[in-house]
Image (tube, rainbow, N blue to C red):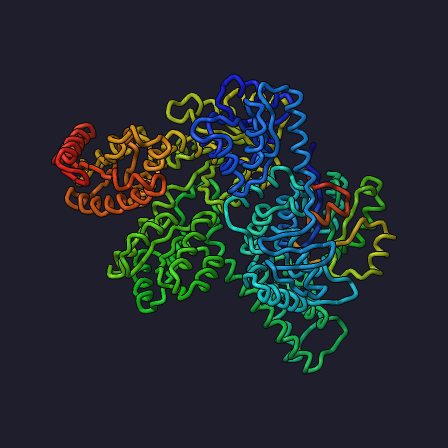
Amino acid sequence: MKILVVEDDKLTAEALVVILTHQNYTVETAADGEMGWQLIEAFAYDLILLDVTLPKLDGMKLCQRVRSHGYQMPILLLTAHDSSHEKAMGLDAGADDYVVKPFDPEELTARIRALLRRNQVTSQLVLEWGDLQLDPRSCEVSYGDNPLSLTAKEYSLLELFLRNSCRVFSCGALLENLWSFEEIPSDEAVRTHIKGLRQKLKMGGAPPDLIETVYGIGYRLKQKEGGKKQKETRRNQREGGDSLAGVGDAAQRQTLILISKVWQRSQERVSEQVGVLEQAVDALRRQELDQPLQLRAKQEAHTLAGALGTFGLSEGSQFARRIEQALQANKSLSQDEVTHLDNWVRSLRQEIDRLNRISQGESKTTRQDTTHTSIVANDAARPLLLIVDRDRSLAQKLIAAAAVWGFDAEVATNLMEARDKIFLESPDVVILDPAISEVTADSLSLLAELKKQVPPIPAVIFTAHNDLTERLEVARLGGRTCLQKSLPAEQVLEAVNQVLHQAEQTKTGIMVVDDDPTLLAIVRSLLEPWGIRVATLADPQQFWQVLEATSPDLLILDIEMPQISGIDLCQVVRNDAHWSGLPILFLTAHTDSDTVNQVFSVGADDFVSKPIVGPELVTRIINRLERIRLVHNLAEIDSLTGVATRQKATQDLDRFLRLAKRQQQPFCLAILELDLLRNSDCDKSIVEKDEMLRQIGQLLRRSFPIEDVVARWSEEEFIVGVYGMKKHEGIQQLNQLLETLRQQLDRVLNSIQPAAKSSNPVTWSAGVAQFPVDGETLSTLCQSAHTALYQAKRLARNRLES
Amino acid sequence: MTAKRILVVDNEQYIQEIAEICLKTVAGWHVLLASSGEECLRRAATEQPDAILLDVMMPDMDGITTFQKLQENSATRTIPVILLTAKIQSSDRRRYAQMGLTAAIAKPFDPLNLAIEVATALGWTLEQ
């Protein structure tokens, strides 16, 4: 059980850690409300212990935020005052219980136990999925307010899906679960009932894909949106899972990915088996089928019947089964029977070809390397570009340009086709025209879906409009680049290539060293689907070369290897100035306390025992990586405004300036300040000021591509740096932006304090400087920009000077 | 706790691979492989797996014969055996039970459920 303690008083926090650790809970602490919120969003906790008075975001507000985001874990409030009013407020904010400080440790732990127990035994009487409700006591089903009248089979199908809401059910599994032995059903029967159920759900107002088809696998409930689901799945994995629900999404996903790889490897063998059947049919037609061929064909049909269903081809299994029966020895076949047999073999061949096509699409995301020691960062396969655009002739031009750039390309001319192709073919990058749908919001929802893919698929927006609000929305949804339709295809592809390259670079990377090539292959196949770059190394002699070349975020070491042991490698890394901070995880077959102690004493961060269990390894690694990302973010991102900190910006700006010098390119630097912040401290509360700063930060971040520098430079100043931009271009862009900003801030101010608007409108000043004309170093450029800024202030507000 | 070891016997290599993946990824068991009845008898006697998953239809020595030979050897008699078979009628289930087989699982099996079916038949939990 994992508990988060949000408490600003260091002593109290330490005391709580001691008490709770003693009770065998895993405890993490946060010193303010915002930090607490970040942790809650990043990790799964079983309970939160929350102080009411906290800096940045107080306990009540945090509590409300947690509940409003749908987190259900119990929250226990720590209040300093034994006042009924405060307790009532806390409970209303969504807390489950409270303890008054100074607390009695025994009472506190007893209350925690009670809350955790309560959470465990919550037995859901009515099964719910969004607006869909099924009451097993009365067998009534409704969607929203509409009662649904289902047949017994439809009802039991729905109940099965609701009780196993993450699971994908193949036709075979549904038959197994819901049909009795005597009913002799077929996959067709399952499909018919699913169809009936879908129609009734649709009539009741449910989305038509509430029960969705997972291609080549089966059916499941459409998964709810949002990141929380993934976290819950991970939690299921961590808890081991002794039930159907425990074998959550991720384990299933991995299993299916690995199976699809087996399919790719076995295609030749399967094709050969079907070939034998084709030979047999041929021989039958010529009335020349001899006994050895008949026997062999019968055996191959038997094997196929027993295997194809497992690959998701249940119909293929059935064809093979019929073929097997038709080929029983001592049985002569009529002309009609031979024709049937021929048809079945053809159908079987078609089914197999179909799966091959799907699996080739999938292989784009689960590419395999034959040499396990090589570095995988550069994929040999051509990246796939999906063009989502109604305009076919334009799409053809893009396809031609794509070929020149080394892309494979596909076109989707409506949203549904686009979704299908994204699912089946996993494109590496997407070009999207928002006009694909009449409703722009629908098109943009596709963008949001792409962002949620694992790994996220980068998108380039290709639009005929140049509308700032649309562009802001696109940026918010993760679209990296907006391009005008008037651009030549060649330039569009250049941008696509750039976007893809950036996406690849921002991927997290890990490096695995193990002398067992099978293990390396497994680790790779487990982690790559999560969007992680995996570099594997079987020969520790090449350790430094590969480490420097791949620059991983995490290192996984085997303990026992010939020549150099993992322990030695770990020590070497810890002693190296540049790499000493690299997180290291050990794989070991030995989990005795001596080995474990040794592993930690040389500086390991974690260990995983062998044989590795897929879900456990994935969970450990992803948790570790998330933690690294969080720590980075805390140091590099300003928590209030969401833009970079001055420290991070200084590094980035220096880097850009060096680059600009080397490449003889201009670099444009702007410093912005909101006059309101400086002049009216006296009549603006801190909360209002913070809200203003937050809005500015968000707008700036959205308005510039991710590679530009946007940072909070001082308490009330922001800095923006754009490589390759000249001063006059910068001024033009900033002017447009600052106008938007002014309007937006007016609205914010108005909502906070209606009276203030007329008396105290928002104004801004900004100064711009350019490398190398206004200065060659960061400090001279900043000076120059500041001078311009003050000049702007003196002259009038709402001005920009250079 | 050490991971369970399970011997999978099938003459078709890709079925071996799939079974291995299903049992390893979902349940975390250690999987041993054999491609024939002969190999099964040898590995079962020397390596003493916790259970055997045995295909019925194999060339040379079929699954039923292999099972009977496992029963004749005192070193392998107590290892639970689950049959993988194309058809299971209720009469078959009775026959298998009388023979001393622990369970029979129908082929093609559902890859996401195989480990659960095996665990249920053997009374194992899927907890690591």
**Horizontal and vertical percent for residue A216?**
57, 60
- Residue A36 in the image: above or below residue B107: above
- Closer-to-camera residue (A750/A214): A750
Q: Quadrant of the N terminus of chain A?
A: top right
B5 on left or right of B69: left
- Closer-to-camera residue (A23/A543): A23
Q: How many marks?
A: 0
**Horizontal and vertical percent for residue A188?**
65, 69
**Horizontal and vertical percent for residue A779?**
19, 27
Of all residues shown, which one is farthest toward the right? Answer: B98
Residue occupying image coordinates x 35% and y 51%:
A473
Residue A3 seen anywhere in this rendered image of the structure: no
Of all residues shown, which one is farthest toward the top? Answer: A11
Q: Quadrant of the C terminus of chain A?
A: top left
- The part of the image, by quadrant, that contains residue A576 is top left
Residue occupying image coordinates x 46% and y 27%:
A32
A480 on left or right of A785: right
- Residue A32 in the image: above or below residue B13: above
- Closer-to-camera residue (A559/B102): B102
- Residue A677 in the image: above or below residue B70: above
- Residue A197 in the image: above or below residue A383: below
Of all residues shown, which one is farthest toward the bottom? Answer: A335
Residue B70 seen anywhere in this rendered image of the structure: yes
A191 on left or right of A405: right
**Horizontal and vertical percent for residue A263?**
57, 56
Residue occupying image coordinates x 68% and y 70%:
A323
